[in-house]
Structures are given as C-alpha cells and as structure tokens.
Image (tube, rainbow, N blue to C red):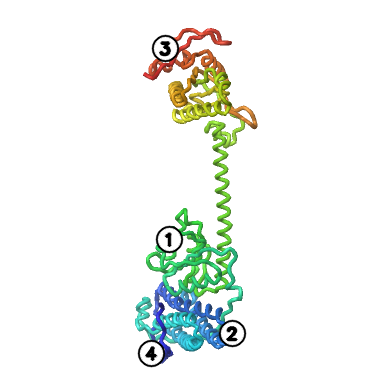
Amino acid sequence: MSEEPPETSPPLDPSSFTRPLWGLPAGVDEEALKRLRHDLRTPLNQIIGYSEMLIETSGEGRSATLREDLQRLHSAATQILALLNEGLAQWKVEAGQVDLIALRRSLLGPLNSVLGYRDLCEETARSLDLEETVSDLGKIGLASRNLRKMLEQESFAERYHLGSPTSAGTTAPIAPGGTRNTAAPDALQPVPGSGHILVVDDEPLNREMLIRRLKRMGFTATGAENGLEALDALTKEPFDLVLLDILMPVLDGFQTLEKLKADEKLRHIPVIMITALDEVSATVRCIEAGAEDYVPKPFNPIILRARIGASLEKKRLRDKERAYLAEIQTERVKSDQLLLNVLPKAIADRLKSGEETIVDAVPEATVLFADIVGFTRIAADQPPARTVALLNEIFSQFDQLVERIGVEKIKTIGDSYMVVGGVPLPLANHAAACADMALAMLEVIQSFNQRNKSNWQIRIGMHTGPLVAGIIGSKKFAYDLWGDTVNIASRLESHGEAGIIQISQSTAALLEHQYVVEKRGPIELKHRGEMLAYRLVKRR
C-alpha cells in the first residue's frame, strides 16, 4: 500500500530558509544537472499522470467540484514542469546561465498549490466515498512530498556534486500560466489490435500509473522493476511491445535494450524508451541501439497512444513479413528436397546457380546394375499392391545404403536399380564403394527373404571405365549416364546368375587387393563380343 498523506500539508515558505540551497559555481558538473532534472521530473511525472487519470474518470454532478480542483492541481503541476524545463534548459546549461536558487524559489509556489488542491480533493473524495480516488490522491501526496523533500534538502548541492552552496544572485521567477489537461476524448479509446505490453520502470508509482493507463487504452500490461527482471519476463511469455525507462538500478535501460536486441529470439520486439532525460544524445543512443521510438516524461497520453499504436502496427507488419519469409523458406526446403529426390545434390546446386546445360565427361567411374531375378513371374503370382510394397521395401533399403556408402543412385527402371561411383563428384575409391554396395545389397535380399519367408534373388553387374554424365529433358528432366561403360555394366548384369556379382576385368583390377575376386572366364556380350568376366565374392 502507498503511504497515506497527512490530513493537511503545510505550505513551503521560501523565507524559512536562512541561506540559499543551490548556486551554480563555475565548472559545474553538467552530468549532475542531468541527474537533477531526471530526479525532479520523476515525482512530477507521477503527480501529472495520476491527476490526468483522475480527471478523465471524474464525472459530473456531485463530483463536479472534485473535477475542478483536480484540474487546478494538474495545472499547478504542469506549471512546475514548465518552470523546470525552462530553468534547466540545455541551452542554459551549455551557456552557464542556470540559476538554481531562482529555479528553486520559482518551484515552491506551484508546489504549494499542488499540495493544497490535493488536500481539497481528498476531502471531497472522502465525502463522496470515492475510495479509489482517495487512494490515487494518496499517491499524488506521496509524490508531492518526495518533491518537497528534494527542495528542502540542505545537502542537495553536495548530493548532486554541484559544488558548495553560494549566495549567487537570483533570477526573477518565471511564471508561465498553468495548463489544463488537454487529452482528447479518444486518448482512452482502445488501440485497434491491442497487444501485451511490458512496462519496465524502477519507480513503483510510475510503473503502476503507466500500467493503469495502458489498460484503460485496451492493452494487457505487465510490470518489471529493472532490466534483469524484464529480460527474464520476455523469455517466459510473449510480449508485443516494451516501454523501457532509462535510469534504473541493476541494469539500466541502455544495457537492457542492447541485450534485448542482441538476442535473436527477442530482437523483433519493439521498444519505446520512456524517461525524464530529454537530451538529444540520449535519444540518438536509444535509436541507434534499436529502439522503435522515444517518449519523454511526463508523457502526453495522446502522443503515447499514437506511438504505441504505430509501433504495434509496424510489429504486426514485420510479424507478417517474418511469417511469409518462414513460409517461403519452408516451401523452398520442400522444393529443394524434391529436387534432391530427382537429382544429385551437386547437380541440383549447379542448376540453382544458373547453369542451364550440364554435360560432364568422366574419365573413370564404376557403374553398378542390380535386377530382381524372375520379377515378372513374382508379380504375376500375387496382387499388384503386394508386389509394389515388397519392391519398395527392398529399394528403400538400397537407398539407405547409397546414403551410407557414398555412391550415387541414378535411377530405377522397373525392377532394375542403377548406381554409380565417382559421379557427379570424383571419388578415389569408386570401385571399392560400388563393391561394398553390391555386397550389402545381397545381405539386404537375404534379410528380406527371412522376414517375408520368400525366395527373391538379384543379379548384379559392375564395370569401370569412362562415361558421359548430364541432364536430359527440359520439364521432367533426369540425370543420366551414357557410354560403353554403362552398356557393359548392364550386359554383365543381364548375363549373370542369381546371387552373383559379376564384374569386368577393369573393375577386378581395382578390387583384387582388397576383395576376394574369382575369375569366371570369357562370356559373350551382345554387341560387344567376348569379354573376360570375374565374380566379386567378399572383402578380404
């Protein structure tokens, strides 16, 4: 609960101080003046904010008198703000024309008015049994007393390192006319597409006031009292916007903003900086660090609402863009995967890079053909769906072997399976890789027969030599191989025996030191004549 104000607040008497509190000695610390301006604005922001909310909710009839006194209170508070802005204007700081004694004296009058009207408003609110209004007036009283303590503090100059108090001459008080709350009626209307906002401020009154203001605008709002707490909250639940104070303990606003924008998961959340600092350098630093916008305290509710709405709309557009990009990326992955199902990765990459015609002359590679023995008879003896399912089971395991061993599947033709080693990427041990593939294919068939209680068999033929590889077709294109090496490998398979891996002499020469190879003798190949054939048995 907030501290309850006393029933009456004694006015401040400027003449009660026997010596001036503040002066501006030569070489005054400019950073100290910035802290002074921030510290004075903090309770002032609370006074103005709560009074604006009370004015907005005050009705007619019995509370008409309360509304008038609230407007006078608000007017006196805005007068203090105007005096503060004028007395500590940046140009005065830079020109060395700040007169803290005159500024202090000029603030006392309107502060007395704030305290007086606050007491009158509380009396009226109590008589009308307006408990919530009395509570908010108590917060205004607490903020007013905090401001008064700052003005009465004897060690004020030393605390802000402004130098020793002096008896410098005074400047006539600036007395601009008070202003009433000019918030437009739509300032409280919900923003279309309202979102979840995180309010980060170490001052409890500031935080509560802003959260209540946001809820009246139609937002969902949550508070955090420092940067670390804010970063923790952002990782636990989704937020659409962060309102971030700059001057905070533990982790200030600048540091919090930098950490937030450095996090890939959080950097898309827009941040609006809200602070009593109004230097151009602070604004520039926030924007450069990634802040969406910047609103000074005390904030104008209309401007705050407009900037929140603009930031949320930008976020919604960016979220849509991110969703579209993610969808495009998903479709691109699907497209790439489909392309890789048709073409080797190296060839697909060349196509995507812009190559239109791909034809490669390969000096040496090993081609392997495998074929199911008696597949026509097998297909005739059982339902087509069963046949296709069994063939798919075998070929799927062959595909896994291709990935594991590092050879390239070229295509399937009916019950025939074609593989190559050394294409499209060079492979020093292409013959050995195809040999391992062939031996593993026999093991797959053996395991298949045991599982399905069947007696399927395959023939395998392999040959090593030069060939041409490339893409044919413009629509349903395919990557294929041409040349005698392909034809001989196919003939070795078709002229082989069930369960046998029949290889050529050129392939056997590359394998004989690592594998057990048996000479089979010459065989007659169609269009090729007689050729010496060998049988690959196992790895040594």
Front position among marks 4 and 1? 1
Task: Determine crowd level at label 1: few under 14, some 14-19, many 20+ residues with C-alpha closer than 10 A.
Answer: some
Residue indicated by mark 1: 231
Number of other residues with Cα within 10 Å of mark 2, as a class: few under 14, some 14 to 19, many 20 or more: few
Q: Earlier in the sequence, mark 4 or mark 2?
A: 4
**Closer to us: mark 3 or mark 1?**
3
How packed mark 3 is, by other alpha carbons closer than 10 Å (few <14, some 14-19, many 20 or more), is some
Mark linked to residue 60: 2
Q: Secondary structure at mark 3?
A: strand
Q: Residue at x 58, y 79 (%)?
A: 182
Question: Within the image, what quadrant is residue 313 found in?
Answer: bottom right
Give, as a three-letter code, the residue at label 4: Phe
Name the image quarter holding residue 180. Answer: bottom right
* Whole-percent x, y for residue 220 in the image: 51, 66
Residue plotted at (48% across, 20% down): 455
Which circle marks residue 351 in the picture? none
- Which disc is residue 518 wearing? 3
Q: Say the numbered circle drawn on residue 17.
A: 4
Q: Are marks 3 and 4 in contact (CB under 8 Å)?
A: no
The answer to whether any part of residue 425 appears in the image is no
Q: Amino acid at mark 2?
A: Glu
